[in-house]
Amino acid sequence: MAQQEDVFKKIVSHCKEYGFVFPSSDIYDGLGAVYDYGQNGVELKNNIKQYWWQSMVLLHENIVGIDAAIFMHPTTWKASGHVDAFNDPLIDNRDSKKRYRADVLIEEQMAKYEDKIQKEIEKAQKKYGDNFDEPQFRSTNPRVLENQRKYDDLHRRFQEVMNAEGGIDLEGLKQIILDEEIVCPISGTRNWTDVRQFNLMFKTEMGSTADGASTIYLRPETAQGIFVNYLNVQKTGRMKLPFGIAQIGKAFRNEIVARQFIFRMREFEQMEMQFFIQPGTELDWFAKWKETRMKWHQNLGFGAENYRFHDHDKLAHYANAATDIEFHMPFGFKEVEGIHSRTNFDLSQHAKYSGKKIEYFDPETNESYTPYVIETSIGVDRMFLSIMCHSYEEQLLPDGQTRTVLHLPAALAPVKLAVFPLTKKDGMPEKAQEIINDLRFHFNCKYEEKDQIGKRYRRMDAIGCPYCVTVDQQTLEDNTVTLRDRDTMEQHRVAISDLRSIIEDKVSITSLLKKLL
Ligand code: GAP
Protein backbone atom coordinates (compact mmCIF):
# COMPACT_ATOMS: atom_id res chain seq x y z
CA MET A 1 0.00 0.00 0.00
CA ALA A 2 2.76 2.42 1.01
CA GLN A 3 4.49 1.56 -2.23
CA GLN A 4 1.33 2.38 -4.18
CA GLU A 5 1.02 5.69 -2.36
CA ASP A 6 4.60 6.46 -3.37
CA VAL A 7 3.82 5.71 -6.99
CA PHE A 8 0.79 7.97 -6.79
CA LYS A 9 2.90 10.82 -5.40
CA LYS A 10 5.33 10.35 -8.26
CA ILE A 11 2.48 10.51 -10.78
CA VAL A 12 1.25 13.77 -9.23
CA SER A 13 4.70 15.36 -9.47
CA HIS A 14 5.19 13.99 -12.96
CA CYS A 15 1.95 15.66 -14.01
CA LYS A 16 3.31 18.98 -12.83
CA GLU A 17 6.86 18.58 -14.08
CA TYR A 18 5.78 17.69 -17.60
CA GLY A 19 3.01 20.23 -18.12
CA PHE A 20 -0.01 17.98 -17.61
CA VAL A 21 -1.66 19.32 -14.44
CA PHE A 22 -0.80 22.33 -12.27
CA PRO A 23 -2.41 23.45 -9.02
CA SER A 24 -4.78 26.31 -9.80
CA SER A 25 -3.29 29.79 -9.23
CA ASP A 26 -0.01 28.11 -8.39
CA ILE A 27 1.91 31.35 -7.77
CA TYR A 28 -0.54 32.05 -4.92
CA ASP A 29 0.09 28.55 -3.52
CA GLY A 30 -2.91 26.97 -5.18
CA LEU A 31 -6.60 26.70 -4.41
CA GLY A 32 -7.98 23.61 -2.67
CA ALA A 33 -9.05 20.85 -5.07
CA VAL A 34 -8.92 23.09 -8.14
CA TYR A 35 -6.43 22.34 -10.91
CA ASP A 36 -5.31 23.72 -14.26
CA TYR A 37 -4.33 21.59 -17.23
CA GLY A 38 -1.02 22.49 -18.86
CA GLN A 39 0.25 22.28 -22.44
CA ASN A 40 0.29 18.48 -22.51
CA GLY A 41 -2.64 17.94 -20.16
CA VAL A 42 -5.02 19.94 -22.31
CA GLU A 43 -4.13 17.86 -25.38
CA LEU A 44 -4.66 14.58 -23.54
CA LYS A 45 -7.91 15.88 -22.07
CA ASN A 46 -9.17 17.04 -25.47
CA ASN A 47 -8.37 13.63 -26.93
CA ILE A 48 -10.30 11.87 -24.15
CA LYS A 49 -13.26 14.14 -24.81
CA GLN A 50 -13.05 13.52 -28.54
CA TYR A 51 -12.94 9.77 -28.00
CA TRP A 52 -16.06 9.95 -25.86
CA TRP A 53 -17.91 12.47 -28.03
CA GLN A 54 -17.28 10.65 -31.26
CA SER A 55 -18.18 7.27 -29.75
CA MET A 56 -21.52 8.75 -28.73
CA VAL A 57 -22.42 11.18 -31.49
CA LEU A 58 -20.63 9.76 -34.56
CA LEU A 59 -21.24 6.10 -33.86
CA HIS A 60 -24.90 6.42 -32.86
CA GLU A 61 -27.31 7.89 -35.35
CA ASN A 62 -29.82 8.45 -32.58
CA ILE A 63 -27.53 10.43 -30.26
CA VAL A 64 -27.02 14.17 -30.69
CA GLY A 65 -25.03 16.65 -28.66
CA ILE A 66 -25.76 19.95 -26.94
CA ASP A 67 -23.82 22.54 -25.00
CA ALA A 68 -26.02 24.07 -22.30
CA ALA A 69 -25.04 27.04 -20.14
CA ILE A 70 -23.53 26.51 -16.71
CA PHE A 71 -25.98 28.96 -15.14
CA MET A 72 -29.54 27.67 -15.11
CA HIS A 73 -32.83 28.95 -13.78
CA PRO A 74 -32.72 28.38 -10.00
CA THR A 75 -35.97 26.41 -10.08
CA THR A 76 -34.09 23.73 -12.05
CA TRP A 77 -32.27 22.75 -8.87
CA LYS A 78 -35.42 22.79 -6.77
CA ALA A 79 -37.07 20.46 -9.28
CA SER A 80 -34.08 18.14 -9.54
CA GLY A 81 -33.90 17.78 -5.76
CA HIS A 82 -30.43 19.29 -5.46
CA VAL A 83 -31.49 22.25 -3.26
CA ASP A 84 -33.04 19.95 -0.68
CA ALA A 85 -31.01 16.81 -0.92
CA PHE A 86 -27.60 17.29 -2.54
CA ASN A 87 -25.87 17.04 0.80
CA ASP A 88 -22.89 15.42 2.44
CA PRO A 89 -22.98 14.38 6.11
CA LEU A 90 -20.12 16.21 7.84
CA ILE A 91 -18.44 15.82 11.19
CA ASP A 92 -15.79 18.01 12.85
CA ASN A 93 -13.00 17.01 15.16
CA ARG A 94 -12.98 19.55 17.99
CA ASP A 95 -9.23 19.24 18.63
CA SER A 96 -7.84 19.51 15.13
CA LYS A 97 -10.78 21.68 13.92
CA LYS A 98 -10.72 19.53 10.77
CA ARG A 99 -13.91 18.63 8.98
CA TYR A 100 -14.61 15.20 7.47
CA ARG A 101 -17.34 13.41 5.60
CA ALA A 102 -18.77 11.02 8.15
CA ASP A 103 -19.64 8.44 5.49
CA VAL A 104 -16.07 8.56 4.12
CA LEU A 105 -14.56 7.99 7.57
CA ILE A 106 -16.66 4.84 7.81
CA GLU A 107 -15.82 3.71 4.27
CA GLU A 108 -12.15 4.12 5.11
CA GLN A 109 -12.64 1.97 8.18
CA MET A 110 -14.21 -0.73 5.99
CA ALA A 111 -11.27 -0.43 3.59
CA LYS A 112 -8.93 -1.05 6.54
CA TYR A 113 -10.63 -4.39 7.25
CA GLU A 114 -10.42 -5.28 3.54
CA ASP A 115 -6.71 -4.38 3.54
CA LYS A 116 -6.04 -6.61 6.52
CA ILE A 117 -7.74 -9.51 4.76
CA GLN A 118 -5.77 -8.83 1.59
CA LYS A 119 -2.47 -8.77 3.49
CA GLU A 120 -3.19 -12.16 5.08
CA ILE A 121 -4.00 -13.57 1.65
CA GLU A 122 -0.82 -12.18 0.10
CA LYS A 123 1.26 -13.59 2.96
CA ALA A 124 -0.28 -17.04 2.55
CA GLN A 125 0.05 -16.86 -1.23
CA LYS A 126 3.80 -16.30 -0.83
CA LYS A 127 4.08 -19.11 1.65
CA TYR A 128 2.12 -21.79 -0.24
CA GLY A 129 2.85 -20.73 -3.83
CA ASP A 130 0.96 -22.76 -6.44
CA ASN A 131 -0.72 -24.90 -3.78
CA PHE A 132 -2.55 -21.89 -2.36
CA ASP A 133 -6.33 -22.30 -2.34
CA GLU A 134 -7.77 -18.81 -1.75
CA PRO A 135 -11.45 -19.71 -1.20
CA GLN A 136 -10.47 -22.34 1.35
CA PHE A 137 -8.09 -19.93 3.09
CA ARG A 138 -10.78 -17.26 3.25
CA SER A 139 -13.26 -19.64 4.82
CA THR A 140 -10.91 -21.11 7.44
CA ASN A 141 -8.20 -18.65 8.49
CA PRO A 142 -9.23 -17.18 11.87
CA ARG A 143 -7.75 -13.71 11.24
CA VAL A 144 -9.44 -13.44 7.86
CA LEU A 145 -12.73 -14.63 9.33
CA GLU A 146 -12.52 -12.13 12.17
CA ASN A 147 -11.85 -9.19 9.85
CA GLN A 148 -14.52 -10.36 7.44
CA ARG A 149 -17.03 -10.47 10.29
CA LYS A 150 -16.08 -6.94 11.37
CA TYR A 151 -16.36 -5.76 7.78
CA ASP A 152 -19.76 -7.38 7.27
CA ASP A 153 -21.18 -5.99 10.54
CA LEU A 154 -19.96 -2.53 9.73
CA HIS A 155 -21.19 -2.72 6.16
CA ARG A 156 -24.66 -3.79 7.33
CA ARG A 157 -24.90 -1.01 9.94
CA PHE A 158 -23.64 1.55 7.45
CA GLN A 159 -26.25 0.52 4.88
CA GLU A 160 -28.97 0.79 7.52
CA VAL A 161 -28.09 4.35 8.57
CA MET A 162 -27.51 5.55 5.01
CA ASN A 163 -30.86 4.14 3.87
CA ALA A 164 -32.90 5.08 6.93
CA GLU A 165 -36.55 6.08 6.46
CA GLY A 166 -36.67 9.83 5.82
CA GLY A 167 -32.99 10.17 4.84
CA ILE A 168 -29.61 9.43 6.35
CA ASP A 169 -29.69 8.72 10.08
CA LEU A 170 -27.12 11.30 11.24
CA GLU A 171 -27.05 10.14 14.87
CA GLY A 172 -26.57 6.58 13.67
CA LEU A 173 -23.57 7.66 11.60
CA LYS A 174 -21.95 9.32 14.60
CA GLN A 175 -22.61 6.28 16.74
CA ILE A 176 -20.78 4.06 14.25
CA ILE A 177 -17.79 6.42 14.32
CA LEU A 178 -17.74 6.24 18.11
CA ASP A 179 -18.27 2.47 18.27
CA GLU A 180 -15.54 1.80 15.71
CA GLU A 181 -13.24 4.10 17.71
CA ILE A 182 -12.34 6.05 14.57
CA VAL A 183 -9.84 8.79 15.37
CA CYS A 184 -9.07 12.06 13.58
CA PRO A 185 -5.95 11.45 11.46
CA ILE A 186 -4.58 14.87 12.49
CA SER A 187 -5.25 15.09 16.24
CA GLY A 188 -5.54 11.37 16.88
CA THR A 189 -8.54 12.01 19.16
CA ARG A 190 -12.19 10.91 19.17
CA ASN A 191 -13.52 14.31 20.19
CA TRP A 192 -16.21 14.51 17.47
CA THR A 193 -19.09 16.94 16.98
CA ASP A 194 -22.53 15.78 15.83
CA VAL A 195 -22.97 14.97 12.15
CA ARG A 196 -24.63 17.71 10.06
CA GLN A 197 -25.82 17.90 6.46
CA PHE A 198 -23.99 20.31 4.16
CA ASN A 199 -25.23 21.29 0.67
CA LEU A 200 -22.58 20.87 -2.04
CA MET A 201 -23.81 23.48 -4.50
CA PHE A 202 -21.90 26.74 -4.99
CA LYS A 203 -24.16 29.78 -4.91
CA THR A 204 -23.74 33.15 -6.53
CA GLU A 205 -25.95 36.10 -7.39
CA MET A 206 -27.21 37.22 -10.75
CA GLY A 207 -28.36 40.79 -11.32
CA SER A 208 -26.84 44.18 -10.73
CA THR A 209 -28.71 45.39 -7.67
CA ALA A 210 -28.90 43.67 -4.33
CA ASP A 211 -32.73 43.84 -4.38
CA GLY A 212 -33.20 42.53 -7.88
CA ALA A 213 -30.54 39.85 -7.64
CA SER A 214 -31.51 36.24 -7.44
CA THR A 215 -29.51 33.36 -6.06
CA ILE A 216 -28.29 31.04 -8.74
CA TYR A 217 -26.10 27.97 -8.57
CA LEU A 218 -23.08 26.72 -10.43
CA ARG A 219 -24.41 23.45 -11.87
CA PRO A 220 -23.34 20.40 -9.85
CA GLU A 221 -23.99 18.11 -12.84
CA THR A 222 -24.43 18.72 -16.55
CA ALA A 223 -27.41 16.34 -16.77
CA GLN A 224 -30.05 18.95 -15.90
CA GLY A 225 -29.01 21.05 -18.91
CA ILE A 226 -30.02 18.03 -21.00
CA PHE A 227 -33.35 17.43 -19.25
CA VAL A 228 -34.51 21.04 -19.60
CA ASN A 229 -33.65 20.87 -23.32
CA TYR A 230 -35.39 17.54 -23.93
CA LEU A 231 -38.38 19.14 -25.67
CA ASN A 232 -36.24 21.57 -27.70
CA VAL A 233 -34.04 18.84 -29.08
CA GLN A 234 -36.80 16.28 -29.58
CA LYS A 235 -38.95 18.73 -31.51
CA THR A 236 -36.30 20.57 -33.57
CA GLY A 237 -34.40 17.37 -34.32
CA ARG A 238 -37.62 15.40 -34.91
CA MET A 239 -36.09 12.73 -32.71
CA LYS A 240 -37.87 9.43 -32.25
CA LEU A 241 -37.51 7.32 -29.14
CA PRO A 242 -35.13 5.78 -28.26
CA PHE A 243 -32.68 8.66 -28.61
CA GLY A 244 -29.89 10.23 -26.61
CA ILE A 245 -28.51 13.69 -25.86
CA ALA A 246 -24.83 13.97 -25.03
CA GLN A 247 -23.00 16.83 -23.40
CA ILE A 248 -19.52 17.64 -22.12
CA GLY A 249 -19.10 20.47 -19.65
CA LYS A 250 -17.95 21.81 -16.34
CA ALA A 251 -19.64 20.97 -13.06
CA PHE A 252 -18.98 22.36 -9.60
CA ARG A 253 -19.30 20.82 -6.15
CA ASN A 254 -18.14 22.23 -2.86
CA GLU A 255 -16.53 18.92 -1.90
CA ILE A 256 -15.41 18.81 1.69
CA VAL A 257 -13.19 15.81 1.41
CA ALA A 258 -11.31 16.95 -1.66
CA ARG A 259 -8.30 14.70 -1.97
CA GLN A 260 -6.38 12.42 -4.22
CA PHE A 261 -5.37 15.08 -6.67
CA ILE A 262 -7.83 15.36 -9.58
CA PHE A 263 -9.95 12.45 -8.34
CA ARG A 264 -12.26 14.68 -6.30
CA MET A 265 -12.28 18.29 -7.41
CA ARG A 266 -14.42 21.32 -6.73
CA GLU A 267 -14.47 22.28 -10.40
CA PHE A 268 -14.44 19.35 -12.81
CA GLU A 269 -15.74 18.22 -16.15
CA GLN A 270 -18.38 15.64 -16.94
CA MET A 271 -19.31 13.78 -20.11
CA GLU A 272 -22.95 12.81 -19.74
CA MET A 273 -25.46 11.17 -22.01
CA GLN A 274 -29.15 10.84 -21.25
CA PHE A 275 -30.86 8.16 -23.29
CA PHE A 276 -34.64 8.61 -23.55
CA ILE A 277 -36.65 5.41 -23.86
CA GLN A 278 -40.09 3.92 -23.63
CA PRO A 279 -41.15 3.08 -20.03
CA GLY A 280 -40.79 -0.62 -19.35
CA THR A 281 -37.72 -1.02 -21.57
CA GLU A 282 -35.31 0.51 -19.06
CA LEU A 283 -33.72 -2.62 -17.65
CA ASP A 284 -32.82 -3.88 -21.13
CA TRP A 285 -31.34 -0.53 -22.07
CA PHE A 286 -29.53 -0.34 -18.73
CA ALA A 287 -27.86 -3.70 -19.47
CA LYS A 288 -27.01 -2.58 -22.99
CA TRP A 289 -25.41 0.68 -21.85
CA LYS A 290 -23.44 -1.12 -19.16
CA GLU A 291 -21.95 -3.32 -21.83
CA THR A 292 -21.35 -0.48 -24.30
CA ARG A 293 -19.62 1.70 -21.75
CA MET A 294 -17.43 -1.09 -20.38
CA LYS A 295 -16.34 -1.86 -23.92
CA TRP A 296 -15.43 1.81 -24.44
CA HIS A 297 -13.14 1.67 -21.39
CA GLN A 298 -11.57 -1.68 -22.14
CA ASN A 299 -10.94 -0.64 -25.74
CA LEU A 300 -8.02 1.42 -24.44
CA GLY A 301 -6.14 -1.81 -23.76
CA PHE A 302 -5.49 -1.40 -20.04
CA GLY A 303 -6.60 -4.96 -19.25
CA ALA A 304 -10.07 -6.17 -18.30
CA GLU A 305 -8.84 -7.07 -14.80
CA ASN A 306 -8.48 -3.36 -14.01
CA TYR A 307 -12.20 -2.67 -14.33
CA ARG A 308 -15.21 -3.82 -12.42
CA PHE A 309 -18.85 -2.94 -11.99
CA HIS A 310 -20.02 -1.89 -8.59
CA ASP A 311 -23.79 -2.28 -8.51
CA HIS A 312 -25.46 0.03 -6.00
CA ASP A 313 -27.27 -1.61 -3.09
CA LYS A 314 -28.64 1.77 -2.18
CA LEU A 315 -30.68 3.35 -4.93
CA ALA A 316 -31.78 6.96 -5.06
CA HIS A 317 -35.55 7.10 -4.68
CA TYR A 318 -35.99 7.85 -8.41
CA ALA A 319 -33.62 5.17 -9.72
CA ASN A 320 -34.46 1.54 -10.37
CA ALA A 321 -30.92 0.39 -11.21
CA ALA A 322 -27.48 1.92 -10.85
CA THR A 323 -23.91 0.81 -11.22
CA ASP A 324 -20.43 2.34 -11.24
CA ILE A 325 -17.59 1.41 -13.51
CA GLU A 326 -14.57 1.31 -11.24
CA PHE A 327 -10.95 1.42 -12.31
CA HIS A 328 -7.96 0.04 -10.44
CA MET A 329 -6.15 3.22 -9.32
CA PRO A 330 -3.03 3.10 -7.11
CA PHE A 331 -5.38 3.84 -4.19
CA GLY A 332 -7.80 1.00 -4.95
CA PHE A 333 -10.75 0.36 -7.27
CA LYS A 334 -12.49 3.72 -7.67
CA GLU A 335 -15.54 5.01 -9.51
CA VAL A 336 -14.85 6.60 -12.87
CA GLU A 337 -18.31 6.41 -14.39
CA GLY A 338 -21.89 6.01 -13.18
CA ILE A 339 -24.70 4.38 -15.16
CA HIS A 340 -28.16 5.04 -13.81
CA SER A 341 -31.66 4.07 -14.72
CA ARG A 342 -33.38 7.30 -13.64
CA THR A 343 -36.99 6.40 -14.53
CA ASN A 344 -38.99 9.49 -15.58
CA PHE A 345 -38.11 11.33 -12.40
CA ASP A 346 -36.26 14.31 -13.85
CA LEU A 347 -38.60 15.03 -16.76
CA SER A 348 -41.66 14.67 -14.51
CA GLN A 349 -40.18 17.01 -11.93
CA HIS A 350 -39.40 19.64 -14.57
CA ALA A 351 -42.92 19.27 -15.96
CA LYS A 352 -44.32 19.80 -12.48
CA TYR A 353 -42.16 22.82 -11.62
CA SER A 354 -42.33 24.53 -15.03
CA GLY A 355 -46.00 23.81 -15.71
CA LYS A 356 -45.02 22.61 -19.22
CA LYS A 357 -46.13 19.32 -20.67
CA ILE A 358 -42.95 17.29 -21.19
CA GLU A 359 -44.02 14.17 -23.00
CA TYR A 360 -43.42 12.11 -26.10
CA PHE A 361 -46.13 11.19 -28.56
CA ASP A 362 -45.38 7.68 -29.70
CA PRO A 363 -46.62 7.31 -33.29
CA GLU A 364 -46.39 3.54 -33.04
CA THR A 365 -48.66 3.14 -30.03
CA ASN A 366 -50.61 6.40 -30.46
CA GLU A 367 -49.89 7.20 -26.81
CA SER A 368 -48.22 10.10 -25.02
CA TYR A 369 -45.94 9.41 -22.10
CA THR A 370 -43.03 10.82 -20.15
CA PRO A 371 -39.92 8.99 -21.39
CA TYR A 372 -37.72 7.01 -19.04
CA VAL A 373 -34.00 7.72 -18.98
CA ILE A 374 -30.76 5.76 -18.84
CA GLU A 375 -27.87 8.02 -17.93
CA THR A 376 -24.17 7.41 -18.51
CA SER A 377 -22.03 9.90 -16.62
CA ILE A 378 -18.25 9.95 -16.61
CA GLY A 379 -15.78 12.45 -15.16
CA VAL A 380 -13.19 13.66 -17.68
CA ASP A 381 -10.69 14.33 -14.90
CA ARG A 382 -11.10 10.88 -13.35
CA MET A 383 -10.69 9.32 -16.75
CA PHE A 384 -7.54 11.42 -17.19
CA LEU A 385 -6.25 10.24 -13.83
CA SER A 386 -6.93 6.58 -14.57
CA ILE A 387 -5.07 6.87 -17.88
CA MET A 388 -2.12 8.58 -16.22
CA CYS A 389 -1.96 6.01 -13.43
CA HIS A 390 -2.07 3.09 -15.79
CA SER A 391 0.42 4.56 -18.28
CA TYR A 392 3.12 5.68 -15.87
CA GLU A 393 6.13 3.40 -15.59
CA GLU A 394 9.61 3.73 -14.19
CA GLN A 395 11.31 1.20 -16.37
CA LEU A 396 14.62 -0.43 -15.56
CA LEU A 397 16.64 -0.71 -18.77
CA PRO A 398 19.15 -3.47 -19.64
CA ASP A 399 22.05 -1.00 -19.19
CA GLY A 400 21.00 -0.43 -15.57
CA GLN A 401 19.51 3.02 -16.20
CA THR A 402 15.86 3.84 -15.64
CA ARG A 403 13.51 5.77 -17.85
CA THR A 404 10.15 7.24 -16.95
CA VAL A 405 7.71 6.47 -19.68
CA LEU A 406 4.00 7.12 -20.18
CA HIS A 407 2.53 4.25 -22.18
CA LEU A 408 -0.43 6.37 -23.27
CA PRO A 409 -2.70 4.90 -25.93
CA ALA A 410 -1.22 6.52 -29.06
CA ALA A 411 -4.58 7.99 -30.05
CA LEU A 412 -4.76 9.90 -26.75
CA ALA A 413 -1.12 11.03 -26.54
CA PRO A 414 -0.66 14.83 -26.51
CA VAL A 415 2.16 14.73 -29.06
CA LYS A 416 2.17 11.99 -31.69
CA LEU A 417 5.51 12.59 -33.37
CA ALA A 418 8.70 14.33 -32.29
CA VAL A 419 11.21 15.26 -34.96
CA PHE A 420 14.88 15.76 -34.04
CA PRO A 421 17.77 16.96 -36.16
CA LEU A 422 20.81 14.95 -35.06
CA THR A 423 22.86 18.14 -35.02
CA LYS A 424 22.01 21.79 -35.45
CA LYS A 425 23.96 22.11 -38.69
CA ASP A 426 24.30 20.81 -42.26
CA GLY A 427 20.67 21.62 -43.06
CA MET A 428 19.31 19.01 -40.62
CA PRO A 429 17.10 21.46 -38.68
CA GLU A 430 15.61 22.69 -41.95
CA LYS A 431 14.92 19.12 -43.07
CA ALA A 432 13.28 18.34 -39.72
CA GLN A 433 11.09 21.42 -40.03
CA GLU A 434 10.14 20.38 -43.53
CA ILE A 435 8.89 17.04 -42.19
CA ILE A 436 6.88 18.79 -39.50
CA ASN A 437 5.43 21.30 -41.94
CA ASP A 438 4.16 18.42 -44.00
CA LEU A 439 2.76 16.28 -41.18
CA ARG A 440 1.37 18.90 -38.78
CA PHE A 441 -1.95 18.99 -40.65
CA HIS A 442 -2.51 15.33 -39.85
CA PHE A 443 -1.40 14.97 -36.23
CA ASN A 444 0.37 16.84 -33.46
CA CYS A 445 4.14 17.12 -34.07
CA LYS A 446 6.92 18.62 -32.00
CA TYR A 447 10.36 19.86 -32.99
CA GLU A 448 13.26 19.38 -30.54
CA GLU A 449 16.90 20.23 -31.13
CA LYS A 450 18.25 20.83 -27.63
CA ASP A 451 20.47 18.25 -25.85
CA GLN A 452 21.75 14.87 -27.01
CA ILE A 453 19.34 12.56 -28.80
CA GLY A 454 19.16 10.25 -25.74
CA LYS A 455 17.91 13.05 -23.53
CA ARG A 456 15.40 14.13 -26.15
CA TYR A 457 14.03 10.57 -26.31
CA ARG A 458 13.63 10.57 -22.53
CA ARG A 459 11.70 13.84 -22.59
CA MET A 460 9.36 12.44 -25.22
CA ASP A 461 8.94 9.15 -23.29
CA ALA A 462 7.95 11.20 -20.26
CA ILE A 463 5.08 12.87 -22.11
CA GLY A 464 4.02 9.64 -23.80
CA CYS A 465 4.94 10.61 -27.36
CA PRO A 466 4.59 7.32 -29.31
CA TYR A 467 7.01 8.11 -32.16
CA CYS A 468 10.28 9.98 -32.58
CA VAL A 469 12.07 10.61 -35.83
CA THR A 470 15.73 11.57 -36.19
CA VAL A 471 17.10 13.42 -39.18
CA ASP A 472 20.77 12.54 -39.74
CA GLN A 473 23.43 12.70 -42.43
CA GLN A 474 21.86 9.82 -44.34
CA THR A 475 18.54 11.66 -44.47
CA LEU A 476 20.15 14.40 -46.49
CA GLU A 477 21.34 11.79 -48.97
CA ASP A 478 18.36 9.44 -49.33
CA ASN A 479 15.36 11.06 -47.62
CA THR A 480 15.06 8.35 -44.97
CA VAL A 481 14.91 8.85 -41.18
CA THR A 482 15.14 6.64 -38.11
CA LEU A 483 11.74 6.03 -36.56
CA ARG A 484 11.77 5.08 -32.88
CA ASP A 485 8.91 3.38 -31.07
CA ARG A 486 8.26 4.64 -27.51
CA ASP A 487 7.35 1.29 -25.95
CA THR A 488 9.86 -1.05 -27.59
CA MET A 489 12.51 1.66 -28.11
CA GLU A 490 13.28 -0.10 -31.39
CA GLN A 491 14.42 2.00 -34.29
CA HIS A 492 14.29 1.37 -37.99
CA ARG A 493 14.85 3.40 -41.12
CA VAL A 494 11.86 4.50 -43.10
CA ALA A 495 11.34 6.81 -46.05
CA ILE A 496 10.06 10.28 -45.11
CA SER A 497 7.34 9.82 -47.69
CA ASP A 498 6.03 6.77 -45.74
CA LEU A 499 5.88 8.47 -42.33
CA ARG A 500 2.31 9.67 -42.64
CA SER A 501 0.90 6.30 -43.65
CA ILE A 502 2.86 4.48 -40.93
CA ILE A 503 1.81 6.81 -38.13
CA GLU A 504 -1.51 8.44 -38.97
CA ASP A 505 -3.81 5.51 -38.53
CA LYS A 506 -2.23 4.39 -35.26
CA VAL A 507 -2.54 7.79 -33.61
CA SER A 508 -6.02 8.72 -34.76
CA ILE A 509 -9.17 8.59 -32.65
CA THR A 510 -10.75 6.82 -35.62
CA SER A 511 -8.49 3.82 -34.99
CA LEU A 512 -9.98 3.53 -31.50
CA LEU A 513 -13.52 4.04 -32.74
CA LYS A 514 -13.21 1.32 -35.37
CA LYS A 515 -12.37 -1.19 -32.65
CA LEU A 516 -15.65 -0.37 -30.91
CA LEU A 517 -17.84 -1.53 -33.75
N1 GAP B 1 -25.57 13.15 -13.39
C1 GAP B 1 -25.14 12.09 -12.56
C2 GAP B 1 -23.96 12.44 -11.76
O1 GAP B 1 -23.50 13.56 -11.74
P1 GAP B 1 -22.20 11.41 -10.13
O2 GAP B 1 -21.95 9.96 -9.79
O3 GAP B 1 -22.39 12.36 -9.03
O4 GAP B 1 -23.46 11.37 -11.10
C3 GAP B 1 -20.71 11.27 -12.27
O5 GAP B 1 -21.02 11.90 -11.05
C4 GAP B 1 -19.23 11.22 -12.50
O6 GAP B 1 -18.67 12.54 -12.37
C5 GAP B 1 -18.46 10.38 -11.48
O7 GAP B 1 -18.45 9.02 -11.84
C6 GAP B 1 -17.08 11.01 -11.54
O8 GAP B 1 -16.33 10.47 -12.60
C7 GAP B 1 -17.37 12.45 -11.84
N2 GAP B 1 -17.29 13.27 -10.60
C8 GAP B 1 -18.26 13.45 -9.68
N3 GAP B 1 -17.83 14.26 -8.70
C9 GAP B 1 -16.55 14.60 -9.01
C10 GAP B 1 -15.56 15.42 -8.39
N4 GAP B 1 -15.81 16.08 -7.27
N5 GAP B 1 -14.35 15.54 -8.99
C11 GAP B 1 -14.09 14.88 -10.15
N6 GAP B 1 -14.99 14.11 -10.78
C12 GAP B 1 -16.21 13.96 -10.23
Image (cartoon, rainbow, N blue to C red):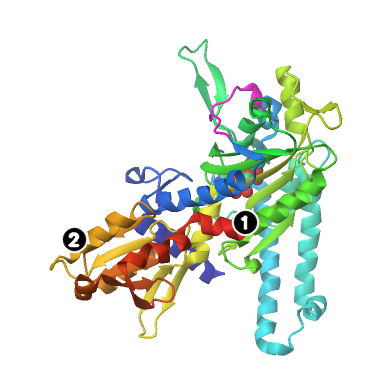
Residue type at tag 2: Glu
Per the rendering, the mark at residue 344 is: none
Q: Which residue is mark 1?
A: 296
Where is the C terminus found, in terms of image quarters? bottom right
Where is the N terminus found, in terms of image quarters? bottom right
- The part of the chain drawn in magenta is 66-77
- Judge the density around disc 2: few (<14), some (14-19), many (≥20) Cα neighbours within 10 Å: some
**Can residue 364 be seen?**
yes
Residue 366 belongs to magenta span: no
Q: Position of residue 136 (x, y in %)?
A: 81, 80
Residue type at tag 1: Trp
Determine which quarter of the picture holds residue 366: top right
Q: Which element type, helix, strand or loop, lies under badge 1? A: helix
Q: Is residue 135 left or right of residue 128?
A: right
Q: Position of residue 251 (x, y in %)?
A: 55, 38
**Can residue 89 be seen?**
no
Q: Nearer the viewer, residue 219 or 236?
A: 236
